[in-house]
Image (cartoon, helix red, strand yellow):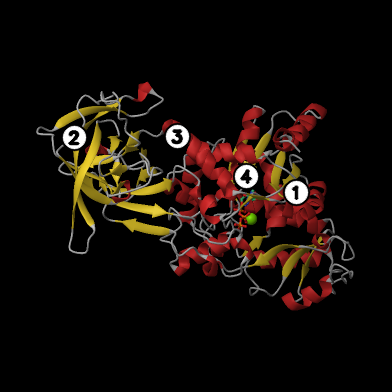
Amino acid sequence: MSTESRSNFLKTQIQADLDGQVMGQLVTRFPPEPNGYLHLGHAKSITVNFELAKQFGGRCHLRFDDTNPEKESQVFIEAIQDDVRWLGYEWHGEVRFASSYFQQLYDWALHLIDHGLAYVCDLSAEEAREYRGSLTEAGRDSPYRTRSPEENRQLFTGMRAGEFPEGSRVLRAKIDMASPNINLRDPILYRIRNAHHHQTGGDWPIYPTYDYAHGQEDAIEGVTHSICTLEFEDHRPLYDWFIEHLPVPSRPRQIEFARLNTSYTVTSKRKLKQLVDSGAVSGWDDPRMPTLAGLRRRGYPPAAIRHFCEEVGTSRSDSVVDVAMLESSVRNHLNESAPRAMAVLNPLALTLTNLSQPETLSVANHPGNEAMGTREVPLTPELLIDADDFREEANKKYKRLVIGKRVRLRGAYVIEAERCDHNASGEVVRVYARIIEGTLGEDPADGIKAKGVIHWVSASSGVPAEVRRYDRLFSDPNPGKSDDVLAVLNPDSLRVIDTAVLEPSLAHAQPEQVFQFEREGYFIADRFDHSGGKPVFNMTIGLRDTWSAVNA
Ligand code: ATP
Ligand code: MG
């Protein structure tokens, strides 16, 4: 299937719905549970819901599905809003909460009771499991299924009043214990839970289940299309059953699509939490995490993530997308948007033997975009180059600095190496080179061209910095498959480089500014740790996909 048709399956269905019915405006929603940070999979759901609303001139809500208070918190509520905005979307109206519909949901539960469609059941969890049956075996009716509406009403209002201990009874829908779809075997609507809720405090000793709450929340908000992932396909008959049997103000439609799975990535909140709790990463926003907060801190542009989600498309069959596709989108965006600068990560001293006076060079910030302007870079007699860019002797394939050979200093002159100093262990500690006169923006007059270009910084005016080099967090392409994500960590996913020296202009970088460090990759000034006095840069991504070459 082409990308075009794959990405259009939701669009086509929605268009048909809008054409066929007097539905008015398309309304979608993004419904996170505030029990963790958003990850790349959520970015997919966000882009699907917000982009569809945009394309059809509709609106998209942000609704917290906060029906499990024990695992939820205000911290996540705020982080999720930040992340949605960072990704580039603004929801319609106020942020919404499932918990603000608790009274309505409760009233509708009484409605089901009064119509003989729900009952209070006293089976223990274990008994209920036995009665439920299996995929091959029908369930059996609970002995409490025949309670009268009056008795059910009395017991349910008692549950609401906090008269019964946790786990002692539940409210169930009365549907069909023999249904081949287990979700229809008298599913639970309410549980007793003596939990403090971040929004409703101690108001409610009972909480609705996701299955009971979700469709009605959609209906209350006038959501027309409740777009979710494939694991909810078998829940759709139940979703529709509630909508059919309750006096809801609108009739939303659930449509499922395949989750986004990406190689080398874990997108289960439980597993991400394990990484955080174990200290394997520094937090939910560690730049190696596939959380939006982590990707942000890593320097992934939101537009690149949106573009990736768009490119992946939506389909109804599960697959794993190569993470290299996301990385390529990141590179493409940064190649356009990131100003160039020079930083030497592993410095080697280089003395220019024939430069008597420092010079100030004007260097373009972007080779393909004049509008990005120029900056001043000081050229001084003492420079630093990367140790990998010099060899005493080398064959023709080595296009960097070699004694007796020429190389161009990026944005500056062609130089020729003359000699070098060694330390007691024989390592090169300083290179001496001379500038070939008249080579600023020109080839040497003698016709002996430079073989390559290397980056450099002034030793006297360069700025020391901490640089964090990141690699993939996992060494296994399918880390989610492993029960223990800690067992498949890449031991070299973070290397802190404390020898880096930046060109002086980078001392003025603002947190979250991304640069291409020439010949090294893309780097972002850390959102939290960077300051002009102590620059800290995180590596966003290398210039080329060295990973697949190395691991092929
Ligand atoms: P997890 O499995 O990590 O707990 P979740 O799906 O339970 O995630 P929610 O907060 O309930 O997390 O998710 C909010 C929305 O994001 C849901 O509609 C869900 O279907 C969607 N979503 C979550 N993960 C993905 C994914 N990998 N691809 C597409 N959509 C996703
Ligand atoms: Mg969920």
The CB of the residue at mark 4 lies under 8 Å from ligand 1? yes
Q: Of callouts 1 and 4, which one flags the residue occurring earlier in the amino acid sequence?
A: 4
Q: Of callouts 3 and 2, which one flags the residue occurring earlier in the amino acid sequence?
A: 3
In x, y percent, where is residue 503?
24, 40
Q: Of callouts 1 and 3, which one flags the residue occurring earlier in the amino acid sequence?
A: 1
Q: Of callouts 4 and 2, which one flags the residue occurring earlier in the amino acid sequence?
A: 4
Category of crowding for the residue at label 4, using alpha-carbon neighbours closer than 10 angstroms: few (below 14), some (14–19), many (at least 20): many
Q: Residue furthest left?
A: 356
Residue type of the residue flagged with mark 2: Leu
Q: Which mark is residue 45?
A: 4
Of circles 1 and 3, the one toward us is 3
Identify the image quadrant of the N terminus. top right
Category of crowding for the residue at label 1, using alpha-carbon neighbours closer than 10 angstroms: few (below 14), some (14–19), many (at least 20): few
Instruction: Place residue 308 in its image quadrant.
Output: top right
Q: Check disc 1 and report its element: helix, strand or loop.
A: loop
Name the residue: 69% across, 53% down.
Answer: 213
Q: Which mark is residue 38?
A: none
Give the residue number, with chain letter if any, for mark 3. Answer: 335
Of circles 3 and 2, the one toward us is 2
Residue type of the residue flagged with mark 3: Asn
Contact (Cβ within 8 Å) of mark 1 with mark 3: no
Give the residue number, with chain letter if any, for mark 2. Answer: 379
Contact (Cβ within 8 Å) of mark 3 with mark 2: no
Report the front residue among 151 and 379: 379
- Give the CA separation, mark 3 to mark 2: 26 Å
